[in-house]
Image (tube, grey):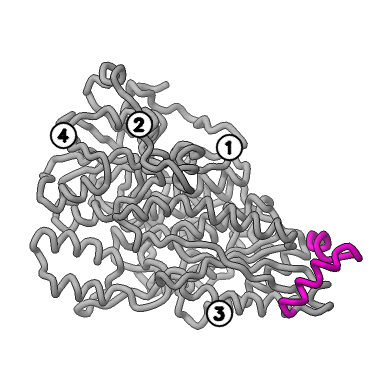
Amino acid sequence: MRSDLIKSGPDRAPARAMLRATGLQDGDISKPLVAVVHTWSNVSPCNLNLRELAEHVSAGIRAAGGTPIEFNTIAVTDGIAMGTPGMRASLISREVITDSIELAVDGHCLDAMVVLCGCDKTIPAAAMAMARLNIPAVALYGGSIAHGNHHDHPITIQQVFEAVGAHGAGKIDDAELAAVEKDACPGAGACGGQFTANTMAMVLQTLGLSPMGFNDIPATHPAKQHAAFRCGELVMDCLREQRKPLDILTQTAFRNAARMVAATAGSTNAVLHLLAISREAGVPWTIEDFEPASVHTPVIADLMPGGRYTAVELFGAGGSARVAQELIAANMLEDGPTVTGRSLFEECAAAPRADQQDVVHPISKPLKPRGGYSILYGNLAPEGCILKLAGKGTTHFEGRARVYESEEQAFAAVQAGKIEKGDVVVIRNEGPAGGPGMREMLGVTAALIGRGLGDDIALITDGRFSGATHGFMVGHIAPEAARGGPIGLLHEGDRIVIDAQSRTISTDADLATRRASWQPPAPKVTRGALAKYAQLVGSASEGATTHPSTHSNKPSTPIHSEAGVTA
C-alpha cells in the first residue's frame, strides 16, 4: 500500500503517534488509508450537504475494510460571485482545488480517495485530480437543489438573474423582485437546470468516474445518503481490483461525454472543463473534437435554461441513464469501462427505464435536430470559440459592434437601456489571462433576456457564459484580447457576422492596420493567486489550465485562419 510509506516500520513511529492522536488504533492504521475529500462550505447551498455525505462515505469505507481520512478544500460559488470582481476567482479555483487535492493525498501517501463535489468548478476539479493522481478513486456529486416555487410555477436561480433585468427595465417592481429572490432556492443543492453543475455531474457519470445514476439523485433526496455509503464501499473495491481513472478516461469516454452534453443542450463550460480533464489524463482531445458530437446529436432533453424542466424532473424521468439509453439505441454512444467495474452500456441497461415522462424525448422526435453548441472560427477567433445554440434556433446574426472593456461596463449599458435590437455586444479583456479568471457573463445575458432582447441581439466575449445563459451568445473567443486576439482590435460600430452554418465569426474591419498600433493592456492584478494564474494560464481553446499540455493541441480537421479561410 502507498500508505505503508508513512505508517510501516520502526522509523515511522512519529507518524503513527500523530495518527493515534486523531483517534486511530492499531487496526485502523494497518488498513488502507482512504481520502474522503469534499468541498463543503456553508456560504451557499451548492456544497452544503457534503460534510454529511462524507460521514456516509466514511461509513462505507469502514464497512469495506478501509480507514477514511477526511479533509476538505475550497469552493467559490458562482451564483454569489457573479457580476463582481470575486467572479475572477471562480475558474482559478478549479486549479487550486485540483492542486490542493493532489498535495494533500500525495503528501500523506493515501491509498485511494472519494471526492465529494457540489458546484461548477469543484466537479471538473475532482476529475482533474483523479486523473492527475491516478489512484483508485470515485467521485460523487452532492446533487441538484429542488426547484423553488413562485406563484405556483417552478423557478431556479436563472429566473432571479432574469428578474434583475426585468426590474431594471421597469417590468417588475421591488416587491416582485424580492419575492422571486426569496422563492428561488429552497435548500441544499446546486443550481437546478442543466447549467454547469448538473452538466458536469452528468459528464462524470458518462466518463465513468461516478456510478451511473448516483449524481442524478437530488441533494435532499433520502437515497443520496445510501449512494454516498455505496461510494465508500466501491472505492475499496476499486483499490482491491486496482481500477484507476486512467483506465477509464479514454477518447471514447470523452466522445460520449461530448454527445451527452449536446443531447441535453448543456453548459458550454463543459467544453472548457473536458479539455482540462483530457490534459490531465494525457488523452488527445481538442476544441474541434466537440463539433461532430454537436452536429450529429439531437437535443432530446427538455431542460432549463432553454427548456422547461430541472434536474429534479430529469431524475424522476430516469436521469442521465435515460438520456444515454436513447443515444445507445441510436448507436450514438460507444461502450467503455466505468468505476463500478461494469461497462457504460451495462450500467445503463441496469438502470430503470421510465416511459411515462416527457423530459427526455425519443431520438425520432427530438426537440432540436442538433446539439446545443457549435465551434466557430474566423478572423475574430483564429483559435476557435463556442456559439451557444440554446435559444430560439437562430443560426445567423449580423450587426454593429457595441464594445465594452469589462463586464461591469456592459452591464451598466444594458441597465441604462443603451443596447438596441441588432446590436452585437462585445465584452473583452475578460479572458483567462486578461480577466484574469475568465468571468462568466450571466449578469449581462440574464439582464438582456429580462429586457426582452434575448432574440434580437448577439453577445461575444473572450470570457465565459454561465450554464444558465441562453440566447445568441459566443464565448471563449481565442486568442483573448489581452494576448493580442482580434477581438481586442474591434471598434464601436464595426460590422460583425456570426454564422453557425459556415461556422464563422468575422468582421470586415481592417484589423491588420489596427494591429500595428495595438499595445497589450496593463495587468489588472499584480500579486497573489490571480496574478500567478494570469502568468501561467493557457488559451481557452486548450481548457484554460495552468498544467502543461502533454500532447499536441492541433485539431484533427481544418480550421479557419484569421483571414476567415480554411488553413
Q: Residue at x 48, y 64 (%)?
A: 320
Q: If you read the primary sequence from the N terminus, does the residue marked by circle 4 or circle 3 appear first?
A: 3
Residue 319, above or below 551: below
Magenta stretch: give its range: 2-23
Q: Is residue 239 visible?
A: yes
Residue 90 point in image, percent of width and height: 42, 54
Distance from the alpha carbon under mark 2 to that under mark 1: 21 Å
Q: Counting other residues with Cα less than 10 Å from the Cα at mark 4, is it few (<14), some (14-19), or many (20 or more)?
A: many
Distance from the alpha carbon under mark 1 to that under mark 4: 37 Å
Q: Amino acid at mark 3?
A: Gln
Query: Which mark, residue 549?
Result: 1
| 101 on left or right of 442 | right
Q: What residue does disc 3 label?
A: 225
Dot 2 falls on a residue whose secondary structure is strand
Q: If you read the primary sequence from the N terminus, does the residue marked by circle 1 or circle 4 appear first?
A: 4
Query: Which mark, residue 400?
Result: 4
| 387 on left or right of 209 | left
Residue 325, above or below 423: below
Quadrant containing the C terminus in the rendered view? top left
Q: Residue at x 30, y 32 (%)?
A: 487
In-front residue for pair 561/28: 28
In-front residue for pair 405/324: 405
